[in-house]
Amino acid sequence: MRVYVELHEVVESEEEPDLVRVDVTDWSKEDIDTLIKELKDYANSNYKHYRLFIHYCRHDEGGSCSFVLVGER
């Protein structure tokens, strides 16, 4: 299983939204928490609306993905 932290900009127009995906599979919980805080700070300063997820990817194992919402505005 791979683990990603993903920041999705939510746009109201036809413009291409930003997407940030960081592979945190081998990271410590403390480092992941720090990344989430930094991405929230960045998103709050740069986006009107966003969603921040932890993405548990099981495609390599033949499974399906699951997502946990950890922030939004």
Image (cartoon, rainbow, N blue to C red):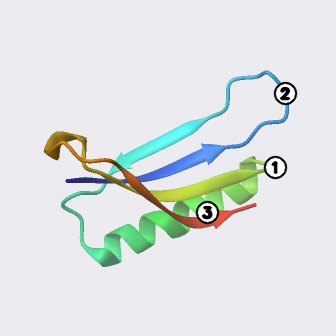
Mark closer to the observer (1, 2): 2
Residue at 50 percent of width and 42 percent of height: 20
On the image, numbered disc 3 is attached to which residue?
40
Residue 16: quadrant of the picture: top right
Please state the horizontal and vertical placement of residue 1, each as a whole percent of the image.
Answer: 19, 53
Tell me how far mark 3 sits from mark 2, CA to CA: 22 Å
For label 2, the residue is: 13
Residue 64 position, x and y percent, is 32, 47
Q: Are marks 3 and 2 in contact (CB under 8 Å)?
A: no
Give the SS element for disc 3: helix
Residue reaching furthest to the bottom: 30
Q: Which one is earlier in the sequence, the residue at label 3 or at label 2?
A: 2
The alpha-carbon separation of the residues under discs 3 and 1 comes to 12 Å
Q: Amino acid at mark 2?
A: Ser
Q: Residues within 10 Å of mark 1 (few under 14, many from 20)?
A: few
Q: Are marks 3 and 1 in contact (CB under 8 Å)?
A: no
Q: Quadrant of residue 52?
A: bottom right
In the rendered view of the protein, which quadrant contains the C terminus? bottom right
Residue type at tag 1: Lys
Name the residue at 76% across, 22% down. Answer: 15
Question: Of residues 71 and 47, which is closer to you in this image?
Answer: 71
Q: Is residue 14 above or below residue 37?
A: above
Using residue 52 as the reference point, say whether residue 43 is left or right of it: right
Per the image, label 1 sits on a secondary structure element best described as loop
Please give the residue where the numbered disc 1 appears in the rendered image: 48
Relative horizontal placement of residue 31, taking residue 27 as reference (left or right): right
Residue at disc 2, secondary structure: loop
Q: CA distance from mark 1 to mark 2?
A: 12 Å
- Residue 37: % across, % down: 53, 69
State the count of labels: 3
